[in-house]
Amino acid sequence: MTRLHFASALLPSGWANDVQMVITAGAIAEVTPGVAPAGGDERHGIALPGLASLHSHAFQRGMAGLAELRGDSTDTFWTWRDTMYRFALAMTPDDVAAVATLLYVEMLEQGFTRVGEFHYLHHDRDGSPYADLAEMAVRIAQAAEASGIALTLLPSFYAHGSFGGAAPHAGQRRFICSVDQFAALMAASRKAISRLPGANIGIAPHSLRAVTPDELAAIIPLADGGPVHIHAAEQVKEVEDCLAWSGRRPVQWLLEHAPLDQRWCLIHATHTTDAEVTAFAKTGVVAGLCPITEASLGDGIFPAREFVDAGGAFGVGTDSNVLVGAADELRQLEYGQRLKHRERNVLSGGAGRSTGRTLFDHALAGGARALAQAAAGLRPGARADIVTLDTAHPSLAGRLRDAAIDGWIFAGGTGAIDCVWAGGHKVVEGGRHRLRQTARERFNAAVRRLVA
Ligand code: NGQ
Ligand code: ZN
């Protein structure tokens, strides 16, 4: 049993002062506001619940910053993808484990306590399955376990190179499964996470580019009630190709043909019309926004204001992991809206409300829904995933409550987080994860080899 005491904490009911929290077996057992710290309490300043990065491709952390050299023609998402595929083709299971471990350490240091790992690098370098079909999923699970982050594993079904069941190309060979092979992969993946504390599993039909309607229908039952994540409408070319194939835009196609409900998460949904936004918001499907990657890849800007006004739910993901941070994703989301609308505090939700707080609340609730977490936030029964802010940080000087969140998101840079508990274990202290050094060494050795 651990007893923590916070000068203030953001609870589901709002901010409370002098909050004592009892943690047992990795979960929050009791939350008592308005009590003075007792002798055995470990004392801290400002506590927030940890957020989810609801969309990650862990292996891509290894190539972060390596696709910033201009090519011969116009650089786009598609030329980036060629670079990314080349990198993916070189990675061994040990490399993936090394890269994922450091990534998850960094996520924890930056305020993420759960990751939705949209996992599609399944097979060996020549495309043949590993002896254990879920070899790579096992490595992801090991990285989660070592770091302490809670894992929602989303094995991805990927079968085609483009709409209408086009053959995949050679660069995609490590991703490709038949429906039967994917069913076996799901079973092996369930086993891979079965003993991992806090872990759960869903499925991820990669995109309408990579999955036919028949395949989509065949794999959805494999989620077995868990989350279903799919990339949709990230790039204009993808929308055009989808229209040419079906006469429908990707989000429109999914609204008409897929059994969308609160278990679903549409990743990006960048190019979504007003009519789609309204219908999408009503379904309860979470928009999985990845603002830093969407900016990095030149995707476009999601109509977040209209979506939220229509009652839509969103969470954030770090996707390509080119830069990892909860505050960074939320700031980029708001700044994209400011640049688009030429206004300030676009997503604040109304007069007198803090933009940082509103963004935080959305990301907490949306992330929990998208990763099938019943009890998000600092409440009894929830996993003890807690983040404290460094009240000595200059961007937090004199800031109380929502103003502290604004200071963290808009002015704190990456240095405003003090401690992080994951499943009740204090894994980050003074901003440093206890595995930072060893995880960096292992990552650096792997990446030096990969880029040589
Ligand atoms: C992915 N990433 O699955 O990693 C994709 C690229 C694809 C983004 N869409 C591959 N940002 O879309 O085919
Ligand atoms: Zn993605």
Image (cartoon, rainbow, N blue to C red):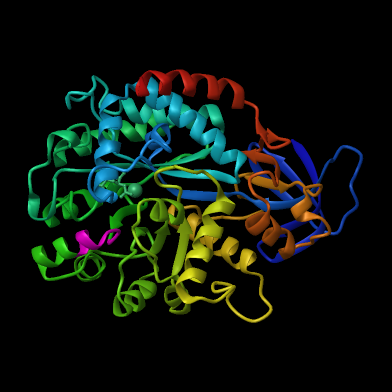
Residue drawn 17% across the image and 33% down it: 173
- What segment is highlighted magenta in the picture? 233-239
Q: Is residue 251 left or right of residue 43?
A: left
Q: Nearer the viewer, residue 446 or 65?
A: 65
The answer to whether one can see residue 227 in this image is: yes
Tell me if 450 is positioned left or right of 291 in this view: left
Residue 246 placement (x, y as % from top left)? 10, 66
**Residue 379 percent coordinates (x, y):** 66, 55
Q: Could you tell me residue 414's position as x and y percent?
A: 63, 45
Q: Residue at x 42, y 20 (%)?
A: 448
Residue in front for this viewpoint, 109 or 198? 109
- Where residue 276 appears, as percent x and y from the top left, is 30, 75
- The C terminus, quarter of image: top left
From this view, report whether residue 65 is shown above or below residue 259: above
Q: Is residue 229 left or right of residue 16?
A: left
Determine whether 110 is above or below 261 in the image: above
Residue drawn at 38 percent across, 37 percent down: 60
